[in-house]
Amino acid sequence: MEGIRRELRRAYGFDEVALVPGDVTVNPDQTNIDFNLLSLTFSIPILAAAMDAVVDVPMAIAMSQWGGLGVLNLEGVQTRYPDPYQTLAEIAAAPDSQATALLQKIYAEPIKEQLIGERIKAIKEQKATCAISITPANTKRWAPLAVEAGVDVVVVQSTVTTARHISKSYRGLSFSELCRSIPVPVVVGNCVSYNAALELMETGIAGLLVGVGPGAACTTREVLGIGVPQVTATMDCAMARDQYLKTTGRYVPIITDGGIRTGGELAKAIAAGADAVMLGTPLAQAQEAPGRGYNWGMANPHQALPRGTRIKVGTKATLKQIFFGPTTVTDGTQNLIGALRTAMGVCGITTIKEMHSVEMIIAPAIKSEGKAWQLGLS
């Protein structure tokens, strides 16, 4: 009996593609990069990832002040310890060989309900927009408490999230019921495929996180062997968004989560179909970040199968420099917003949605062509 031949589909990451300049150019100052999430509008299309080394209460407030959105990990050290900074210092000081075991021990401490309300109220007291992240298993328990405390956005997040979950042990979380039961936008992720994205949108969610495994501190691709390069993942999920819009008239924004380090990669993510991006490690390098120059994956403390690692990222610049400059480096990791606006201007584009139509080409030599001196090959 002959076997069935399967053909592999080619998928692309940021390093393999490039944007084509437009026939008309636009002054970067005339571009509009607003990100809309139902009734909420953000002046920059950037979310800070729900990682303990990236977002604490002060960082969430700072993100809001600069026009973005910081997402607080509701299952992290901020809700397990009354004084999380002693714990964060302990994590930063641990030798590499002991970091994962220490994280597993630290995250075994139970979540304390009173701290959920305290952290959210501390953000809201500063007139900042507050978003929190919960895993699906804990959403039904913690989401109502977060809403009661005044949260503005609920993010339900796991390594891979689908609208349908098969289990013998419990009735899974219904996103449709969740969206009907709480009066704030619900963002769900993570997802990398057309079908899963379409089914999630059909549940009524307000936004979709795209990306499995590309983050600098994530090891999901190595541990589980799953993932899709971010450009292809974003394009597939954006195609589902466009089909859903055509069918229902409702627009569900796509947020590319992970693997973005530079302004050029930010621009490519938007051109691939994203309405916004979620950044982790680039913001862990900010002076305002709580990780003390380190970052670690959200799944790193898993008791049975860690899928993240603690990495040393250093402290490079202020949050303002990372977003708006002035930049002191030439590698594209600072003034991300200036780079995005300039890329849009060069492509002759004035809005995020128009950016989705920019021509993108396969260009595996985009970073090496003519760069022998920079690469130390001359």
Image (spheres, grey):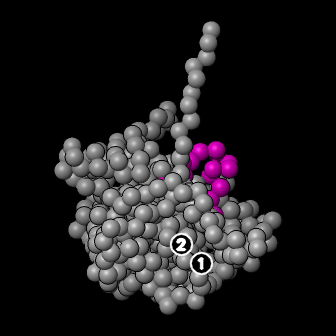
Pinpoint residue 184: horizontal percent, then vertical percent: 28, 63
Q: Mark 1 sits on what residue?
A: 331
Q: Which one is nearer the viewer's eye here, 130 or 46?
A: 46
Amino acid type, label 1? Asp
Q: CA distance from mark 1 to mark 2?
A: 7 Å
Quadrant of the rendering where the C terminus is positioned: bottom right
The residue at the point 24 percent across, 49 percent down is 245
- Residue beneath the point at 62% across and 12% down: 2
Please tell me how crowded label 2 is: few (under 14), some (14-19), or many (20+) other residues with Cα within 10 Å: some
Q: Is residue 210 above or below residue 49?
A: above
Q: Secondary structure at mark 2?
A: loop
Camera-side residue: 304 or 185? Answer: 185
Q: Confirm or deny contact between disc 1 and disc 2 (CB under 8 A).
A: yes
Residue 173, given in percent of the width and then of the height, sits at 40, 46
Upstream in the sequence, badge 1 or badge 2? 2
Q: Residue at x 29, y 63 (%)?
A: 353
Residue 218 on the magenta segment: yes
Furthest-left residue in view? 249
Residue 88, position in %: x, y?
Answer: 64, 77
